[in-house]
Image (cartoon, rainbow, N blue to C red):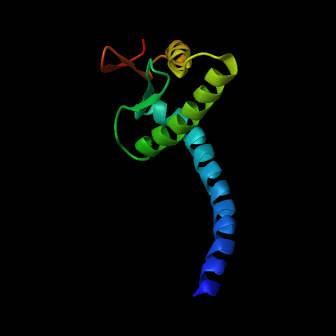
Amino acid sequence: MKRFTKLKLLLLPALFAISLPVLAMNLQQAMSALGQAKAQGLVGEQANGYLGVVNNSGDAANIVKLINDARRAEYAKLAQQNNIAVADVEAMAGKKALERTSAGHYILLDGNWIKKP
């Protein structure tokens, strides 16, 4: 029984190391798919600095989750580096994201998804 526990303890770091590239690849795939997902009207930008699901089709929810998780981590890092609140970083990022959104892509305004003119 003790031998089995030791084996598990030895395998856990190896399994974790193997899973890291998979997670990174998934985020990379989500980033690659983002432009098309926006063009298809599946995801859009929000004033809070995060993506939202406009039409829950295909991989939209997965793309949004992976990218938002990465954004959340980056916002926290920026807030700490600049000694400001995470909410302030989110608001600044959201403002920029809305401004940079291409015409015809979706943005969330006043609780409604609209195509940016």
Residue that sits furthest to the front in the current view = 2
Q: Decide: is 11 above or below 75.
A: below
Task: Work out whether residue 107 or residue 84 is closer to the camera in this orientation and state it.
Answer: 84
Say which residue appears at 41% left-offset and 31% top-offset: 52
Q: Nearer the viewer, residue 10 or 65?
A: 10
Q: Position of residue 72 (x, y in %)?
A: 54, 32
In the image, residue 107 sits, relative to residue 61, either above or below, namely: above
Which part of the image, by quadrant, shows the N terminus?
Answer: bottom right
What residue appears at the point 48 percent right and 27 percent down from the top-left corner? 50
Please name the residue shown 69% across and 61% down the image: 17
Q: In this view, does 54 lie to the left or right of 49?
A: left
Say left or right for 70 vs 45.
Answer: right
Q: How many marks?
A: 0
> In the rendered view, would you say 23 is above or below 33?
below
| Front residue of 91 and 38 | 91
Q: Quadrant of residue 48?
A: top left
Q: Would residue 6 be found to the left or right of residue 105 on screen?
A: right
Q: Where is residue 73 in the image (x, y as percent from the top left)?
A: 59, 34
Q: Could you tell me which quadrant the C terminus lies in? A: top left
Q: Where is residue 109 in the image (x, y as percent from the top left)?
A: 35, 15
